[in-house]
């Protein structure tokens, strides 16, 4: 009699196993096809930041167990447009005041990280992307910043459309959607730590006009993964993920340069997306490694195929080194923070 409950649990686990495999497969397919659709629509609508819709779609799909509602998506696009305009206006006013300017950028990023710590993935992504692009581009070019602001709104709309199409093609199991985790309490401490990790980079950006905001986007993405994996694997694993994404982007760039055309390019993105997303959905605590790798791959390959305005495709190697250096900085900063405060908490959580 004492073994009956255990046997029943084992039987139920065996019955759920095929559904878990199917859910993991659909999640990987959504991420990979979401990135492909993002690239496809970005080319179709001639988005300035060619990589951004695919990047946003992959990030949202990796964080969301179910698709956003139509009203939620429309509200998010409207909110991004309003915030982009406000950010552009404030950035122009404080552009000549470095201290106030840095404080403004820091506040944007802080609130983005705060929302992220509470599990609010979509608004967090919105604020972090805004804080990583518009204020920094204003320093280099007011005209360029206005164009970037419009591109951000268009990229978010395309990303949401890609998310809806991906969920329509590969729907979420009803049980999985119902079991989605609820919002957790926000952590001002973690948001403050994450923001402080970016302060040296923001200072360098304000001093050195050659630095690209893409490096800041890479650092923000890696920092967001800090709390999503096992602390003992975070630093080295995320560094490996960033390097892996750079290597895959370099190999893919060679192939798409030889065999030109959108069909071959999208097939390459799909192949790499299925590989990395497929590993990520079953990797457990190591999932952030593959998420960082896919983000680095999307950014680098997207920049190589359709460069940021005022840059040329021949600078692919420079962009690769910039992204790898940004990843190395982020990983080094994370390792310092984890050693002091994050490791014990993470160890206790994993033990529990």
Image: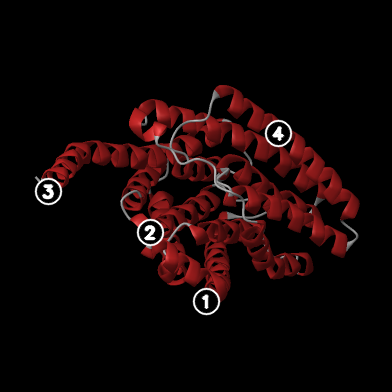
Q: CA distance from mark 3 to mark 2?
A: 34 Å
Q: Position of residue 165 (x, y in %)?
A: 44, 28
Q: Nearer the viewer, mark 3 or mark 2?
A: 3
User: Of helix, strand and loop, which one carries label 3?
Assistant: loop
Residue at the top extreme? 70
Q: Which mark is residue 269?
A: none
Q: Residues within 10 Å of mark 1 (few under 14, many from 20)?
A: few
Q: Earlier in the sequence, mark 2 or mark 4?
A: 4
Going 46% across and 65% down the picture, which residue do you hit? 346
Q: Are marks 3 and 2 in contact (CB under 8 Å)?
A: no
Above or below, 201 relative to 185: below
Q: CA distance from mark 4 to mark 3?
A: 57 Å
Question: Which color mode does the image show?
Answer: secondary structure
Above or below, 218 relative to 155: below
Q: CA distance from mark 1 to mark 3?
A: 44 Å
Residue at the left extreme? 1
Q: Which mark is residue 285?
A: 2
Q: CA distance from mark 2 to mark 4?
A: 33 Å
Q: Residues within 10 Å of mark 3 (few under 14, many from 20)?
A: few
Q: Nearer the viewer, mark 4 or mark 3?
A: 3
Camera-nearest residue between 349 and 104: 349
């Amino acid at each position: 009699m004492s073994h009956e409950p255990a046997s029943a649990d084992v039987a139920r686990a065996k019955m759920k196993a095929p559904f878990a495999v199917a859910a993991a497969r659909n999640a990987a397919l959504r991420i990979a096809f979401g990135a492909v659709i993002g690239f496809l629509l970005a080319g179709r609508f001639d988005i300035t930041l060619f990589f951004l819709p695919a990047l946003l779609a992959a990030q949202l799909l990796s964080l969301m167990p179910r698709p956003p509602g139509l009203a939620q998506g429309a509200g998010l696009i409207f909110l991004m447009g309003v915030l982009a305009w406000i950010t552009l206006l404030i950035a122009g006013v404080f552009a000549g005041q470095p201290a106030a300017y840095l404080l403004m950028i820091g506040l944007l990023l802080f609130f983005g990280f705060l929302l992220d710590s509470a599990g609010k993935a979509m608004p967090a992504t919105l604020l972090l992307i805004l804080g990583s692009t518009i204020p920094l581009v204003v320093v280099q070019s007011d005209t360029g910043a206005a164009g970037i602001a419009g591109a951000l709104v268009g990229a978010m709309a395309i990303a949401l459309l890609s998310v809806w199409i991906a969920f329509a093609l590969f729907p979420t199991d009803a049980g999985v959607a119902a079991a989605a985790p609820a919002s957790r309490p926000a952590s001002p401490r973690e948001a403050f730590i994450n923001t402080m990790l970016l302060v040296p980079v923001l200072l360098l950006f304000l001093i050195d006009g050659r630095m690209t905001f893409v490096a800041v986007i890479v650092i923000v993405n890696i920092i967001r993964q800090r709390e999503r994996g096992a602390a003992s694997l975070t630093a080295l694993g995320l560094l490996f993920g960033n390097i892996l994404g750079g290597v895959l982007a370099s190999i893919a760039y060679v192939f798409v340069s030889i065999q030109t055309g959108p069909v071959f390019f999208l097939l390459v993105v799909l192949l790499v997306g299925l590989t990395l997303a497929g590993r990520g959905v079953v990797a457990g605590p190591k999932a952030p490694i593959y998420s960082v790798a896919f983000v680095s791959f999307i950014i680098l390959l997207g920049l190589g195929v359709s460069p940021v305005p005022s840059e040329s495709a021949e600078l692919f190697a420079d962009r690769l080194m910039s992204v790898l250096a940004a990843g190395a900085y982020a990983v080094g900063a994370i390792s310092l923070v984890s050693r002091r405060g994050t490791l014990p908490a993470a160890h206790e959580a994993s033990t529990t």
